[in-house]
Image (cartoon, grey):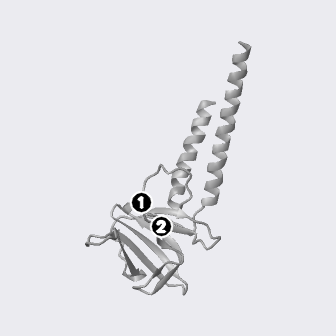
């Protein structure tokens, strides 16, 4: 029984680590993105933007509705994002269906801003470095969340059953 609980918990934690990249994790114990950027799922109700990439102060760097005045685009949707140790890049589209890359990197200039953001035309982005990509648009996060939650409930129920039988056995001794 203990092995069953352990397997269920390890599997739930593994699933939760995958959900981190979609901003839907339950525990904050997983590998972090560069530049202290965190993925966050805000939902779509009450003016929220859905999936967002945020800085350490919880300000949205890349999200639906963000406007980048230097390039004149407003993000409609984040399609995917990728990262390596030095930067994070997101493929987004605007309300006209045009695709752009938004690149976040360390700001080496003397500035109060730690992160430099650049908007690149889709054709201008060169994927010359190793980047791990996360497909936000087509992710099976709902099924992953349900599986994680059922595994946790299963673990708790099995634990309670085992604890009950241990207590009953102690009373009869």
Q: Is mark 2 on a helix, strand or loop?
A: strand
Relative to residue 110, is residue 16 drawn left or right? right
**Label of residue 2 in the image:** none
The answer to which of marks 1 and 2 sits earlier in the sequence is: 1
Q: Name the residue under label 1.
A: 33
Q: Do the residues labelled 1 and 2 touch (CB within 8 Å)?
A: yes
Closer-to-camera residue (129/110) = 110
Relative to residue 117, is residue 43 drawn left or right? right
Measuring from the top left, give residue 42's x and y in whole percent: 58, 65
Q: Looking at the picture, does residue 27 appear above or below residue 77? A: above
Measuring from the top left, give residue 12's x and y in whole percent: 58, 46
Q: Label 1, label 2: how many angstroms apart (C-alpha)?
A: 10 Å
Closer-to-camera residue (29/90) = 29
Q: Is mark 1 on a helix, strand or loop?
A: loop
Label 2: how many Cα within 10 Å (few below 14, some 14–19, many 20+): many
Closer-to-camera residue (29/135) = 29
* Quarter location, residue 110: bottom left
Residue positioned 29% across, 72% down in the render: 111
Q: Name the residue under label 2.
A: 53
Measuring from the top left, give residue 120's x and y in whole percent: 39, 80
Label 1: how many Cα within 10 Å (few below 14, some 14–19, many 20+): some
Residue positioned 56% across, 44% down in the render: 11
Q: Looking at the picture, does residue 166 appear above or below residue 100? A: above
* Quarter location, residue 86: bottom left
């Amino acid at each position: 029984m203990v092995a069953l609980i352990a397997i269920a918990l390890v599997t739930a934690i593994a699933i939760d680590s995958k959900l981190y990249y979609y901003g839907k994790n339950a525990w904050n114990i997983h590998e972090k993105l560069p530049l202290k950027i965190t993925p966050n799922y805000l939902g779509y109700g009450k003016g929220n933007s859905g999936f967002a990439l945020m800085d350490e102060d919880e300000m949205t760097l890349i999200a639906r509705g963000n406007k980048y005045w230097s390039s004149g685009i407003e993000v409609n949707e984040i399609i995917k994002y990728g990262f390596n140790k030095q930067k994070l890049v997101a493929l987004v589209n605007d309300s006209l269906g045009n695709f752009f890359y938004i690149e976040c990197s360390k700001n080496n200039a003397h500035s109060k801003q730690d992160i430099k953001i650049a908007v690149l035309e889709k054709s201008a982005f060169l994927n010359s470095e190793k980047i791990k990509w996360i497909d936000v648009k087509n992710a099976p996060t709902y099924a992953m969340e349900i599986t994680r939650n059922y595994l946790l409930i299963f673990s708790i129920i099995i634990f309670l059953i085992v604890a009950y039988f241990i207590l009953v056995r102690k009373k009869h001794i």
